[in-house]
Amino acid sequence: MITLRRELAMALVIASAGVVVIGALALVATALTLRGDRVAPLAAACAVAILLGALVQALRRYRSRAGGRLRMARTLAAETRSPLPAAARADILGAVETWWLLGGRGEGPGHVASTDLAEAYVQRTDERMRRLNRQSPLPPLRPQLLVPPALALAFAGLVLIPPAIREAAPLLLAGIDGRPQPPPAPLWSSLSLTLTYPPHTGRTPRRVENPSGALRLPLGTQLALTLQPQPGSAGLVLLVHRDQGSLGDPAPQVRPLEASGDGRLGVAFTVESPGAWSIAATVRGVQQSSPPYPLEIEPDAAPEVELLPLPSGARSPSELDTVELRFRARDDFGFAAAELVIARGDDETRLDVGAPPGRSWNHRYRWDLSQMPLEERTELEYWIEVRDNDPLRATPTAARPGKVTRSTRMRLSLRDREAEHAANIEGLRELRDAAVDHLAARMMTPAFERDGERSPIARLDEARSLHAAAGDLLAALATMLDRLAVDQLTRERDTTLLGAVHGRLRPIFVDEQRLHERVPVGAAIDAPGRARSLLASLVGVNDRMIRQLEDEIIRLDDLVDNQIVARIEALVARIEASQRKLVELLERLKAGDRSVLPQIEQLQARLREDLRRVQDARAQLQKEVDREFLNLDAFQAIQARMEHEDLDERLRRGDVDGALERARERLDELRGLRDSVQQRLANAPSAQLSPQERARIKLLRELSRLQDNERGVEGESRGVHQRWRDAVGERELPSAEAEAIRKTASQLQRRLEGVNDAHLSREGRDAVGDALEELSRLATAGNALEAQESAAKLAEALRAATDGAKPGELEAKALAKLRDAAAKLRERTAGALPQPHDLLDGPEAQRLAELGQRQSGIETRARELLELPESEHLPEAGASALKRAASSLQRSAGALRERRTGEALSAEAEAIRAIQEAIDALRKTSTPPSGGSDQASTETERDRSLRDEVVEAMREEAPEGYAEPVKRYYEELLR
Amino acid sequence: MSASSVLARLRVALLAGALVGIAPSVAGAAPSFAESVTAWDLEGARAALAALPRGAERQAQEGIVAIYEADYARAESLLTAALASGELPEDAPILDEARHYLALARGSQRALGAAITLRSDDGAIEAVFSDSKDTILAPYLFAAMAAAREVLGKELGVTPRAPIRFEILDDPAKLALVTPLTLDNIYATGTIGITKYRRIVMVSPRVLLYGYPWLDTAVHEYVHYLITLRTRNLAPVWLQEGLAKLLEARWRSPSTPPLSAASQRLLHDALTKDDLVTLAEMSPSIAMLPTQERAALAYAEVETMLSFLRDRRGDAGLTEILDRVRDGEDAEAAFAGAWGASFADFMRSWMTDIKRRTAAAARGDASLRERRFRDSGDPAADPSLVGDVFSHLGGGKARQHARLGVLLTLRGHPRAAAQQYEKARRADADARRDPKLARRLGEIYLDLGDPERALPLLELAAKDDPEQPNIAAAEGRARLRVGDGEGARASLDRALRVNPFIPSVHCDLAELAASEDERRRERALCHE
């Protein structure tokens, strides 16, 4: 049977197939164009059209095939796939046509001859067909047959279809345009960013035009943005988004752009975290935003530091030595500070080792152990601690900003030679006391009292005890001789003197021994007469021994006192040097440099330690009978006053001026008193000094005075120079000039690194290191004054390095060229600043003129010294040093008059060094005092010379407070 | 010391003057509150207060009066209340004044702490000790002040009706709490005594290693006290200090001790070189002169000026000056009035006289012995004794034996040491006359129980350094041992005047005591 349903089903199948094809085509089209928005409706329309077409076709087909019984019968007859036999189908057609003709319906296929037959035929065929009713005239539809191929097709589609097709499906299904969004129309026609890096990075500002990607910047960088807006845009704002890396990122900061004079708009912000920035504006009434530009943070890494171990020979220095520490440090942005940390148990001391230049630093630090309060045989731990210049604190609780890195810890064992020497002096004192005791025993012995109650035997025993005690005394003398012989701080002549004492006492002891040997122990028990006889003989020896002891005790006392005085003088010299250093540090503190506080504290502790040693030494000079009544409660008041006047206490109260004034007073006292003593020593008419010694002392005094005067001029020159520095300290180098200097410095650095410093002297190598350090500074210099000072130091270092090379060798030639280049660089940097003679005028110019005059006076005096008869005692090295000092003084005088304070200072420092060399050379020529051991028997009867007076003066009052021990020493002498 | 007290007094006067901003009232008019306070006239001050309306200002002034009455707790309460009220005018001097006195009231209470107050039997002296250890000073202070009251009362014509209050502090630094002086001032000038706010504040000799002439200092301050009362605090510095120096020893000696040779020499040199310290230079304080030498010269000048006037015009001349100054007359004019001619005439006469009298000393070699406020911090130190002090003997055998004597003494061999000292004395005539050697040997003999040999030696030492309390104590003991009781007391008194904390002095005084009470007291202080 032809049914509408069948036709419709067929149409649906066809339409479905058509839709699939259309879908596939649509996918391809979408994949190619990404226009899901366009393809989807088109495909849908096609699908609908196909569906409609199929339906129409089905209806038409149905009508054409099943539009009436006749058409249907014919269609059936033509259907070969029908399960009905062909005869049956022909019968049906025949019957229908017959029925058609019988009904007289229109034109039929023919005409009916017999109606009845025809009707019967129709009737019979109908009945027969009814019997076939249960059998469908058409084959059944089997749509399930389509499912496997459809599934197979779908699977193949999923697997085989290219990804582009698959990705196109969502676009197609959603009906969206899959093409990438076109960038919004820019809000500006030109944009520039000026990056101002935080100061600690040392980077110069950078300008970026029309940036397009992410910016990687150190934290704290300031971005100044200017743009030319597109016409029609308004209300431009900057949006700064911060990535917090956590839930709920905060809303962006919004800042309006402000107009600048040239029609551009601008805004600035500081990068405080990673994030992005964008610009939003209203363009012709529409809110638009630029794409976000990411901001990334450039990390600031912790610094690195490497402390090199000391050479094995320098690992056990004396407490008076200086050790040279070498270390290297690096940081990505630079350093804020570097400190030497010294640990003794729980105590930590920090010393500023200088301002690290740039981002890498090879440095040598001369660690003056004599400025530290060290106890005997101390073991120290030390390391270098560098702190980078990161303005942020490493932890919220950190006391100071910046990240800190420590080097490896090193150990240092100290030998306290000074303390060893002090122990030997104490031993000498004990020896002297033993001699005194022995003298008293011999003076008061009843052994030789004939009228006494004691028996001769008992008296002889007493005499033997005295003899044995004399033997002990000589043994103690011999032991002391051994100890002094290995004491580096004891002069040889003192050992000789002690040997002479032993040599003079021993013959008397031997004589006494011979006498005692006449009567062996126990032999006199039954012979008191022998005992009396022996005692009578011993009286004379005892008297000789008493007289000799009276002399030798005075010599021993002198020896002890001389050693103590020498020790005190050494300590005083050290105290003076420390005091001078303290004044310098306090001046820096007053100028606002608080980094010197640990050094001040250290130096103070060292001074206290040295003063304690002076007090101990003075206590050894005390020869007092402990019978005096003292109000001991007074010590508390004294202590309170000392504390009040103590420098530390003043600093704690914030009285830096007071502390500085006090320190200067003490230094003046020390200088003045030392000068007075030297003058007294040289002029004393009663002094038992040889003419040579007197001349030497006079010369020494003159040189000391010369040096003090020069130090005074240097201090004042420095003060005036500092005013010039204050005036120009803030000036920056012009950028072109800075760049040129950097370039030159880099070139010089490369050339200097090419010099083989192994061929230089030790000083030359050190100077090369100094030069490299200054070149590092110059390579980052932006400040004109710093550049000038670095260039001057560089020139000086290269001069010293050239001196450290052997003339004629390659290194010498290379260094000479570098030296000349450095001199030019110095000139160039000097040109970037107004010089002192340009700025210093009025009272300062007047002051400099006066200083120049004073300097000329000092120079004249230095030259006069060379002409003095006493100068013949000045060794050649000393004379040469003094001549150099005179030339430096002359240069300084000229520079001062011309207001070239920097040069003047340099010349003054050189002059002071040269005078010190002359003093050292003279000191080395010290000769033993006149009067040899041959005259010793009469020596004690003469005036003990001025040294005695010094000693006696030392015995007067004990020290009080800071400078008092030293002051009294000299003060009493001068009375 | 005394110079500082003048400075302090001057400051108080200036402060009080600033408080009221007026000049002293003319004769006849009722004195203002400030004038009365400046003159320590507390009755006058109270009368002036009564006229004031009640309020913060009056409360503050009552607090100030309480300070002068030494009622520090009440003063603190009143001044705190006045300041807390907020009613004191911001720009008026009374506000600063109230703050100053409040700090003083608090400082005084801190300085004194749980003080012990002792009164003399006659009630004339009240001594307040911040430390009970110092109460041993009381009987000697009372005795000296009793003598001073009598002598100076006649001399200056004024005897205070109210008890004189002494506050004895146990720390020089505490002076900074009770005066406007800073610690720096005190340490720099060596201030140990101040007369201020109607009381005398002194530091105990116990807190100075060797003590100091504390009784003379007490009387010196008392003279300032009397002059302040007599002149209503109008005497200038030079007059104050001159009189105080002139009269400080009068309590124990009818005549003023002669000027030391060193001071005479200073004076003579200054006269010769026309380099005297002018009276103007002495103001505001002698303590502000640049050197101790100038200060000593200033004291010598004013002391001899007043001494000269008294010698020529009698004691009445001095009181006449004081009265004229009190009445508002210029001090130099008052001086001229007492002299009977112009001040310039007086100066000429004084210079001529003093030049003549000091001529002999100028030929000597005496040098100024500087008094050190604080001595050495070394407990074993004594400038007069420490070490081998025989360098002045020069060379030779005397020196050698003297040194051996010292070494033997140090090692505990006194007899051997004595032998060596004797050898030294035999070796050289100078050594025989040497006071230091004499002291050493004398003390050894005294220890060895030989006072007869010790005494002449110690006398020799004491003659050279009469102010040394240990020598005086040793001399006193030697005299006691040889039976010279009167001489012993004189020597021991000398030691007491400088350092009453030497225990041996009290042991010897116990033996010399005139009464059982005194013996008991002295024995209690004897700790040998």
Image: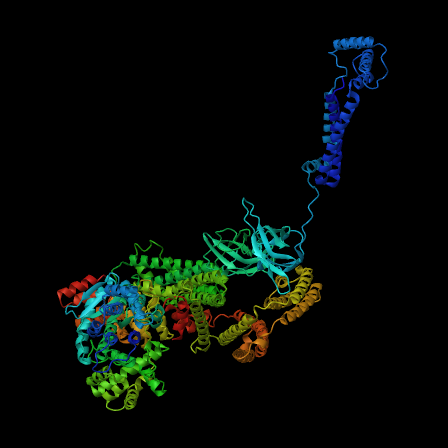
Q: Nearer the viewer, residue B515 or A625?
A: B515
Q: Is residue B469 left or right of residue A300?
A: left
| Residue A769, quarter of the rendered image | bottom right
Q: Nearer the viewer, residue A956 or B210?
A: B210
Q: Is residue A36 left or right of residue B499?
A: right
Q: Is residue A581 left or right of residue B494?
A: right
Residue B248 appears in the picture as rendered: no
| Residue B232, quarter of the rendered image | bottom left
Q: Nearer the viewer, residue A293 or B380?
A: A293
Residue A827 appears in the picture as rendered: yes
Residue at the image position 32 percent from the left and 73 percent from the top = B371
Q: Nearer the viewer, residue B385 or A126?
A: A126
Q: How is the image coloured?
A: rainbow
Q: How many marks?
A: 0
* Quadrant holding the N terminus of chain A: top right
Residue at the image position 78 percent from the left and 8 percent from the top = A124
* Residue B118 rendering spot, x and y as whole percentages: 19, 65
* Quadrant holding the C terminus of chain A: bottom left
* Residue B100 rendering spot, x and y as whole percentages: 31, 69
| Residue B108, quarter of the rendered image | bottom left
* Residue B23 rendering spot, x and y as whole percentages: 28, 80
- Above or below residue B57? Residue A524 is above
* Residue B389 rendering spot, x and y as whole percentages: 35, 71
